[in-house]
Amino acid sequence: MAISSADEFIRLRNSQQSDEYLRAAHEPASTEVWIDVIEQYPEARIWVAQNKTVPLDILAILAKDPDPKVRFMVAMKRKLTPELLELLARDSDESVRERVARHRRTPRAVLERLANDPWEEVRSVVAERLNSEEG
């Protein structure tokens, strides 16, 4: 099964029935449907990022979202490419950079750059990760 429209996604996401609510989190949709959700329901962008099947091209759009909560959710996605992790590592929001520092697929070069991050928490996570790789 797949989500066939932006309206269907919103209806599923707002449903009080757990099976419908879970469909919004787990079922795929076409790129066009995801773009429609983003454009027609901007408040739902974080829900799009939470969907388990959302494609990388949509995550690339959401990685540049004005809302740091959306970018944070993107940074949590396991399937991120090195390019998206690099983009998010340069984010203005420290919590997004911290998520990138914790991401298991973050390239070493990105971690090494984050080792000089202005936020102590990011530097601490990176130091721990780099030390564990060496040990």
Image (cartoon, helix red, strand yellow):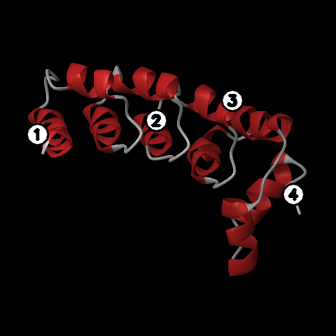
Q: Mark 1 is on which residue type?
A: Ser
Query: Mark 3–mark 2 contact, CB under 8 Å?
Result: no
Determine the residue positioned at 70% across, 62% down: 26
Residue 97 at what x, y percent from top left?
A: 30, 32
Front position among marks 4 and 1: 1
| Label 3 sits on residue | 57
Give the spatial CA distance, label 1 vs label 2: 21 Å
Callout 3: 10 Å neighbours few (<14), some, many (20+)?
few
Q: Earlier in the sequence, mark 4 or mark 1?
A: 4
Front position among marks 4 and 2: 4
Give the spatial CA distance, label 3 vs label 1: 31 Å
Give the spatial CA distance, label 4 vs label 1: 41 Å
Marker disc for residue 2: 4
Q: Mark 4 is on which residue type?
A: Ala
Give the spatial CA distance, label 3 vs label 2: 14 Å
Identify the element where label 4 is drawn: loop
In the rendered image, which quarter contains the C terminus?
top left
39 w.r.t. 103: above or below: above
| Label 1 sits on residue | 124
Left or right of residue 31: residue 73:
left
